């Protein structure tokens, strides 16, 4: 939830850390700070608000040094203010800590320290870590040993980085549980660390991903990784292939707009190398799926949160239709606590952009415990979800920085489509001609997505209708029901308009009572097997005086007679229609948020990766 950056080397630590934090600001933007060891002392600069406040502080009060840590915060304990910003110092000022996570036994540890006379300077749970570490240092332990002993006492999931003025050549970083990730970047005579790859991708591609229950001691030319019992383990270096430029905003005003515009490339990369259009074959090598395994599967559970869960709902329809396997979609935060019925013949598919969403990881752990086949559809390379899964479909969307997920929504739609075809083929459920058609349907998809992205001016004329409203209803049926959910989520999270997605057939069971001209209804009425039913539902809204904005297929002659406004999408085989139908709704949310002056990339109260429960 928070973003962490660290550096040790020979260059100016503050500017490198600041630059990394800017790339991680999507993870939290309540406050930001950094600590650098400068002339044998720890110098801290931190302030409430966005990272630009930290920049101003560094300009008026620069800090020199070649080792340091930084943090951008999403507040959990203690209000967002400078005092509660990280890094946190202890009583001596000789140790600094940055932390991502929630210390679940915080009250107990706080009481213990208070009884020993500790005067806390902040309202954070994090300060406990540094206070405890200082006590161990006072007993003669090294920084890494003190950290190891303290970490062993913390409950919950955490990423923690410590520096000490007494050992000014090293960072000590630990990861506990499935909280935030820790990536260590190996440079030439310098080392980086960050919560997420984009923060350090422009410096190195040689990365080490810390697993839960590991800690590392990082010096400029040496890296040691240990288990929490102190045992040293081999360092596993991986090469990350993302382009560093893909994490930049480029010429766009917002990451969100950039990422919406990148979607044709997302689809091209998603399909690229995986589809043989001549043979009509799908290849998903990282999934490790064999015909024997495919035949064994009796049911599938898709588990995810937010936008990723909406993608899973589309996947349910695709897999059931194409592969004829029963599929359930389970919100990860519910799945983990429900004693789910899962066995070795169940395939559990976790979908996650970040690969570090705490609820999704916990659901994966639950599935693993119950011996399910565990797959991930994950964007962040090397993330925990990718590493936990038995097999994976890497999303290939590249870094997604905007808090509102856009390209990481459409990528899994196509991944799930390909998975459905592959499963069907391996299970012998698909005639070769059917398979050929399904596979070839993918051929024009990047162009069709490109066409949708190009229709931004259509949306510009509709967004003013939403500018001053308070509520909005999205309705869809069948394969477009998740589009309604996702369209509503986009609008609510970036424009702060209350929006609800609803299965259109349910309107008459309650929500239709809300219809008036003050609450627009966005209806997804594309050419698909539910089209006639949707037309009926839109008519019902119209009959009650509702204001209708329709997403409809080019050439539809009935919709213009009913809808007030239409966002047209190109004709496309219906099973792929959610990929294109969501694009005008992403743009609508974006344009509306702009008109309302909202902070599109960093909506209030949200963070990109939810690494806490
Ligand atoms: O990283 P994940 O895909 O696991 O994240 C899941 C949700 O937190 C995420 O989709 C969230 O709902 C987005 N803000 C939606 O735009």
Image (cartoon, rainbow, N blue to C red):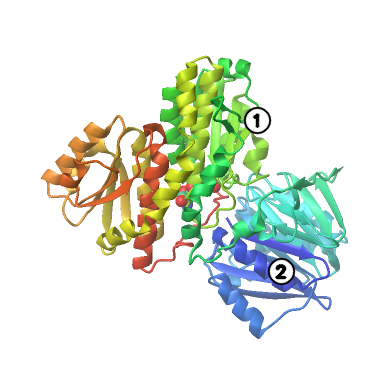
Give the residue pinned by disc 2: 16
Foreground of the two, 606 or 393: 393
Which mark is on residue 404?
Answer: none
Element class at badge 2: helix
Foreground of the two, 432 or 527: 432
Q: Locate residue 433, reporting x and y percent.
A: 46, 19
Q: Does the residue tagged 2 have its C-beta within 8 Å of any atom of ligand 1?
A: no
Residue 565 in view: yes
User: Does the CB distance between marks 2 and 1 fall below 8 Å?
Assistant: no
Mark 2 neighbour class, 10 Å CA radius: few under 14, some 14 to 19, many 20 or more: many
Q: Nearer the viewer, mark 2 or mark 1?
A: 1
Is residue 71 positioned above or below 330 on the image?
below
> Quarter of the image holding residue 192?
bottom right
- What residue sits 68% from the left and 44% below the top? 382
Mark closer to the chain start, 2 or 1: 2
Instruction: Identify the residue at the far front of this view.
Output: 278
- What residue sits 61% from the left and 62% below the top? 23
Is residue 529 positioned above or below 591 on the image?
above
> Quarter of the image holding residue 169?
bottom right
Give the residue pinned by disc 1: 285
């Amino acid at each position: 939830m928070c973003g962490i950056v660290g550096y040790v080397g020979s260059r100016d630590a503050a500017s490198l850390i600041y630059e990394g934090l800017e790339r991680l600001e999507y993870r939290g933007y309540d406050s930001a700070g950094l600590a650098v060891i400068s002339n044998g002392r720890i110098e801290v600069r931190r302030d409430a608000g966005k990272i630009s406040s930290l920049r101003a502080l560094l300009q008026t009060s620069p800090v020199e040094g070649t080792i340091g840590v930084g943090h951008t915060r999403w507040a959990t304990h203690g209000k967002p203010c400078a005092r509660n910003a990280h890094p946190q110092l202890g009583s001596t000022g000789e140790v600094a800590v940055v932390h991502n996570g929630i210390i679940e036994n915080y009250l107990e540890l706080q009481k213990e320290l208070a009884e020993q006379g500790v005067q806390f300077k902040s309202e954070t749970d994090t300060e406990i870590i540094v206070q405890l570490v200082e006590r161990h240092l006072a007993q003669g332990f090294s920084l890494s040993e003190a950290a190891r002993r303290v970490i062993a006492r913390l409950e919950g999931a955490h990423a923690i980085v410590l520096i000490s003025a007494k050992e000014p050549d090293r960072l000590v970083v630990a990861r506990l549980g499935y909280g935030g990730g820790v990536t260590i970047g190996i440079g030439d005579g310098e080392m980086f660390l960050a919560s997420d790859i984009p923060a350090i991708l422009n410096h190195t591609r040689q990365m080490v991903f810390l697993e839960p229950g590991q800690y590392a001691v990082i010096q400029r030319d040496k890296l040691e990784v240990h288990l929490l019992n102190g045992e040293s383990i081999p360092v596993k270096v991986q090469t990350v292939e993302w382009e560093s430029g893909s994490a930049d905003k480029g010429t766009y005003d917002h990451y969100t707009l950039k990422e919406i515009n990148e979607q044709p490339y997302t689809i091209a990369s998603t399909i690229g190398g995986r589809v043989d259009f001549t043979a009509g074959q799908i290849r998903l090598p990282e999934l490790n799926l064999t015909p024997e395994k495919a035949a064994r599967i009796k049911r599938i559970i898709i588990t995810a949160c937010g936008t990723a869960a909406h993608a899973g709902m589309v996947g349910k329809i695709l897999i059931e239709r194409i592969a004829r396997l029963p599929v359930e979609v389970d919100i990860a935060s519910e799945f983990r606590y429900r004693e789910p019925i899962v066995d070795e013949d169940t395939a559990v598919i976790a979908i996650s952009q970040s690969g570090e969403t705490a609820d999704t990881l916990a659901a994966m752990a639950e599935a693993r415990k119950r011996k399910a086949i565990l797959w991930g559809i994950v964007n962040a390379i090397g993330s925990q979800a990718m590493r936990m899964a038995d097999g994976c479909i890497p999303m290939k969307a590249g870094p997604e920085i905007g808090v509102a997920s856009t390209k990481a929504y459409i990528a899994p739609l196509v991944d799930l489509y390909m998975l459905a075809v592959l499963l069907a083929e391996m299970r012998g459920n698909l005639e070769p001609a059917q398979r050929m058609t399904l596979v070839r349907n993918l051929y024009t998809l990047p162009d069709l997505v490109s066409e949708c992205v190009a229709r931004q001016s259509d949306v510009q004329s509709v967004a003013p209708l939403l500018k001053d409203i308070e509520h909005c209803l999205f309705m869809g049926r069948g394969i477009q029901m998740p589009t309604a959910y996702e369209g509503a989520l986009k609008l609510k999270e970036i424009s702060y308009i209350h929006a609800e997605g609803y299965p259109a057939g349910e309107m008459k069971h309650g929500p239709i009572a809300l219809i008036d001209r003050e609450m627009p209804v966005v209806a997804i009425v594309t050419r698909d097997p539910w089209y006639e039913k949707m037309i009926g539902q839109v008519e019902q809204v119209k009959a009650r005086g509702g204001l209708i904005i329709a997403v409809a297929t080019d050439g539809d002659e009935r919709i213009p007679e009913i809808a007030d406004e239409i966002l047209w999408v190109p004709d496309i085989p219906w099973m792929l229609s959610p990929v294109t139908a969501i694009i005008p709704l992403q743009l609508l949310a974006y344009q509306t948020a702009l008109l309302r002056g909202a902070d599109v990339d960093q909506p209030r109260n949200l963070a990109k990766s939810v690494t806490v429960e």
